[in-house]
Amino acid sequence: MDVLWEDKYFKNFDERTLDVSAIKNMKSVNIFLMIFLSVITFGIYPVYWFYNKSKEVNGLYPIRKISNKFLNFFLFFFIIDPGINIIDYLQRALINETVIKLSSNIIGFMLLFWVFFIRNRMNAIIGAKPSDQQWFKGVLTFFFNLFYIQHKINKLNENKFKS
């Protein structure tokens, strides 16, 4: 049998037991503060949040870590994307518009993958089932990204879910 289904976090849903105490040490952050920081840092704060949350999740779930290669690959594109745009602006058409769009699209897709990496591991760590209120939902994760993940962490830390 695949190792994925043998460890205690990625069991079949029927075998999972809910235990939100595993994330009690994850920091609660005000969502409005996150939005404010995201705006005033021109999108740098969300990368900082993703990076820190990945490290926390990796510490709680060392069996299926979010790869450092993935993090480094993302950071590479995140750093070169503004550079590509600045060079294009200064040199006017030095860089093909397709390269600019490709770089931005890679960043967007990687952020989406990244938030789902965190979401899946959070569900596994707390042992949530799709029928549980504590379950990190896919559609909400897709639309609200880091803000939804942090909201769920805040609620779990405040114990605002019915048992």
Image (cartoon, rainbow, N blue to C red):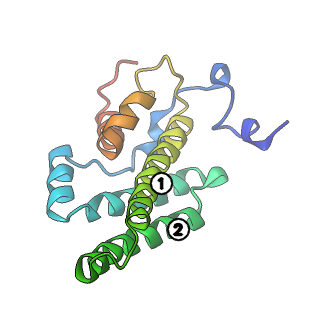
Mark closer to the chain start, 2 or 1: 2
56 versus 2 height, above or below: below
Image quadrant where one finds the N terminus: top right
Left or right of 36: which side holds 134? right
Q: Mark 1 = which residue?
A: 110
- Corner quadrant of residue 3: top right
What crowding class fits label 1: few (fewer than 14 Cα within 10 Å), some (14-19), or many (20 or more)? some
Q: Amino acid at mark 1?
A: Met
Image quadrant where one finds the C terminus: top left
Q: Residue at x 53, y 39 (%)?
A: 120
Q: Residue at x 74, y 35 (%)?
A: 5
Q: Position of residue 54 (x, y in %)?
A: 47, 56
Q: 67 or 134, which lies in front?
A: 67
Q: 117 or 58, which lies in front?
A: 117
Q: Amino acid at mark 2?
A: Phe
Left or right of 121: which side holds 78? left
- Corner quadrant of residue 10: top right
24 versus 65 height, above or below: above
Q: At numbered mark 1, what does the secondary structure look like: helix, strand or loop?
A: helix
71 versus 86 height, above or below: above
Q: Position of residue 93 (x, y in %)?
A: 32, 75
What crowding class fits label 2: few (fewer than 14 Cα within 10 Å), some (14-19), or many (20 or more)? few
Q: At numbered mark 2, what does the secondary structure look like: helix, strand or loop?
A: helix
Q: Residue at x 51, y 32 (%)?
A: 19
Q: Residue at x 21, y 52 (%)?
A: 34
Q: 94 or 152, which lies in front?
A: 94
Check whether the beta carbons of the residues at disc 2 and disc 1 lie within 8 A of each other.
yes
Q: Mark 2 = which residue?
A: 73
Left or right of 19: which side holds 8? right
